[in-house]
Amino acid sequence: HAAVLAVRAAGASRVVVAAPVGAVDTVVRLGRVADEVVVPEQPDQLHAVGLWYARFDPVDDAEVAELLGAGAAREGAAT
């Protein structure tokens, strides 16, 4: 929800949210703020997203910060 609002505030003319699996109520809520939501697997009871993946390793804060920094650097180089 917050990401959709953020990209809209940044000027996105169309927002599509996509994920391989998600809870039905979450898909409905996202559909209220996004132009389109694509989630092919919407089980009645989604206990944990990680159960739907063969490999769902945790990502630590340092790796996330590194990836965000790399993306920001690419974005800055493109302008």
Image (cartoon, helix red, strand yellow):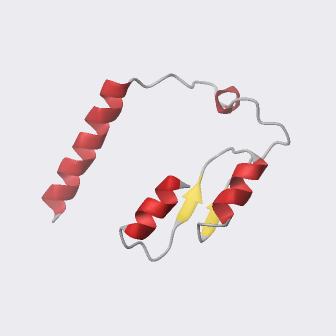
**Residue at the location (64% across, 46% down)?**
20
Residue 44, percent from left and from top: 85, 42
Determine which quarter of the picture holds residue 68: top left
Residue projecting furthest to the right: 44
Q: Is residue 7 visible?
A: yes
Where residue 15 sits: x, y (%)? 51, 68
Q: Which residue extends farthest bottom?
A: 13
Answer with left or right where residue 5 lies relative to residue 21. left
* Vertical placement of residue 77 versus 73, above or below: below
Q: Residue at x 55, y 64 (%)?
A: 16
Q: Position of residue 67 (x, y in %)?
A: 30, 38
Residue at 23%, 41% in the rendered image: 69
Position of 50 relative to 70 (above/below): above
Q: Determine the image quadrant of residue 35.
A: bottom right
In the image, residue 21 above or below residue 49? below
| Left or right: 20 as drawn, with respect to 78 | right
Q: Quadrant of residue 10?
A: bottom left
User: Which quarter shows the C terminus?
Assistant: bottom left
